[in-house]
Image (tube, rainbow, N blue to C red):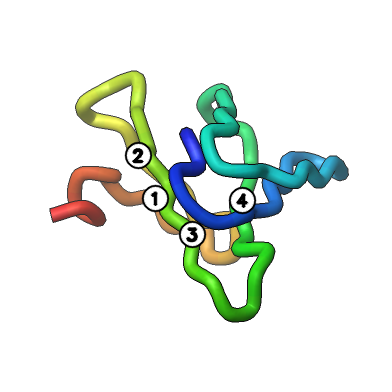
Amino acid sequence: MMLLEGHAVFDIGDEHHDLQPRDTTFIPSGVPHRFRNASDVDGMKILWIYGRVDATRTLVETGETRAVSAEHV
């Protein structure tokens, strides 16, 4: 993931990291994480790059797993 615009907070485990444009992250498969917009008024734009064409995402809150390709049509 690369933050293209805006400011974000990256949460992984008990850690919280402030992200600025052009900051990048790598998250291994199966590791719960999230990105939060650090602004109440400005948007943020993220570039996602997946290691596999058949990548999936599992939502921690519901346990639902779905194909990433289905979310980005």
Of callouts 4 and 3, which one flags the residue occurring earlier in the amino acid sequence?
A: 4
* SS state under label 4: strand
Of callouts 3 and 1, which one flags the residue occurring earlier in the amino acid sequence?
A: 3
* SS state under label 2: strand
* SS state under label 1: strand
Q: Which residue is mark 4?
A: 34
The residues tagged by marks 4 and 3 sit, at their Cα atoms, a distance apart of: 14 Å
Q: Amino acid at mark 2?
A: Thr
Residue at figure coordinates x 61%, y 51% from the top left: 34
The residues tagged by marks 3 and 1 sit, at their Cα atoms, a distance apart of: 25 Å
Whether label 2 touches label 4, CB < 8 Å: no
Of callouts 4 and 1, which one flags the residue occurring earlier in the amino acid sequence?
A: 4
Whether label 1 touches label 2, CB < 8 Å: yes
Residue 37 lies, in percent from the top left, at 60, 63
Q: Quick one: label 2, few (<14), some, or many (20+) residues within 10 Å?
A: some
The residues tagged by marks 2 and 4 sit, at their Cα atoms, a distance apart of: 15 Å
- Circle 3 or circle 1, nearest the eye: 3
Residue at figure coordinates x 68%, y 46% from the top left: 10
Q: Which residue is mark 2?
A: 56
Q: Which residue is mark 1?
A: 65
**Above or below: residue 60 compared with residue 32:** below
- Circle 3 or circle 2, nearest the eye: 3
Q: Amino acid at mark 3?
A: Met
